[in-house]
Image (spheres, grey):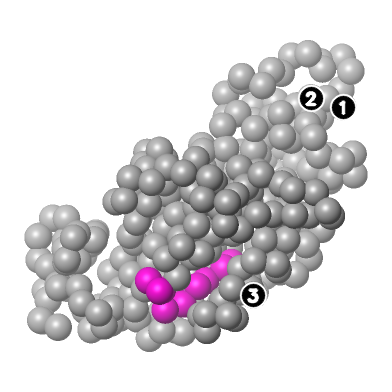
Amino acid sequence: MPEIKKCKHKWSLGDSKIFCLVCRESQKIDDKNIRTLSMGVGVQTCYLLLRFYERYDVIIHADIANDDREHGEYDITYWILDNIVKPFCDEKGLPLWIISHPKGGVYHRSLDEKKIPMVHPRWCTQDHKIDLMTKSIRKGLNANFPENVVISDIGFSSDESTRMDNSGSKVKYNVLDYPLINMKITRNECVEWLNKNYPIVMNGNKVDWKEAKSGCWFCPFWRVSKLKQLPMNKKQEMIKLEENSAYHKTFKKKPMKIILGLDSHTLMEWSDDDELNDDTACNSGHCFV
């Protein structure tokens, strides 16, 4: 590859080149560039894996629970991981890296450090997904700039292009790509294809792929209607997280006890249309895909 001036600006991905958004210095992309998939085990990333697997050299999934699935993601995520993603990668000979944070899962780390998942700062996704993936790419694939730039696909669909705002890699040896946006494929199109080709059957019941959104069950960015469907023990654990935190009552402007309908005096004050009731509010690029 040509010698490139090592500027300090942000580099991005074009049709056939990696280029600096400021200096316009560029580096040609060829078949030698390693490509990974940031696997969230949701609709979009599963669609990319199952339909375009030949595109990838390595699949990387960040385990936010550190094997404690009771304090991790929804059951459907683990069902898809165990019954579809792992067997598929084995069949195709694709390396599947499952990485985790050395300080523990998000839930227990939140309790230990008296904090909660939140937007400012977005520490949970940054620490337990983005930074972990970047480090694994750096060390595991010997990524460096400009000799060995690794490209990572992010599963934003074309109807979620606004979520790209905060998902850019902060290092030049790892450049992000958005194939579903480039191919103008929507989430609904992914769902339709997955339902037809890889149906989900959990406990004898067929489940629509539209329900397959990755993310911690205690994440405050789920729609309120979904949070209210949590079983009582998980509602209580979510309240415990907040009340233990130094940022008490900052989940969604109102205490979780009210949001989850466990405070009879204020039960009707929160509606499903209130602010931060959209699970696309977190635009990190590594959750809900």
- Which numbered disc, 3 or 1, marks the residue closer to the eye? 3
Q: Left or right: where does residue 80 sit relative to residue 20?
A: right
- Residue at 58% from the left image edge and 63% from the top image edge: 128
In the rendered structure, which segment of residues is drawn in magenta?
54-62
Contact flag, marks 2 and 1 (Cβ < 8 Å): yes
State whether residue 57 is above or below residue 219: below
Dot 2 lies on which element? helix
State whether residue 257 is above or below residue 137: above
Residue 284 seen in the current view: no
- Disc 3 residue type (three-letter): Pro
State whether residue 101 is above or below residue 176: below
Q: Position of residue 230 (x, y in %)?
A: 81, 39
Q: Which residue is mark 1?
A: 262
- Which numbered disc, 2 or 3, marks the residue closer to the eye? 3
Q: Is residue 263 magenta?
A: no
Q: Left or right: where does residue 11 sit relative to residue 244?
A: left
- Disc 2 residue type (three-letter): Ile
Total of numbered circles in the picture?
3
Q: What's the mark number on residue 258?
A: 2
Q: Nearer the viewer, residue 93 or 39?
A: 93
Q: Position of residue 241 (x, y in %)?
A: 77, 46
Pointer 3 or 1: first along the chain: 3
Q: Residues within 10 Å of mark 1 (few under 14, many from 20)?
A: some
Q: Nearer the viewer, residue 138 or 110?
A: 138
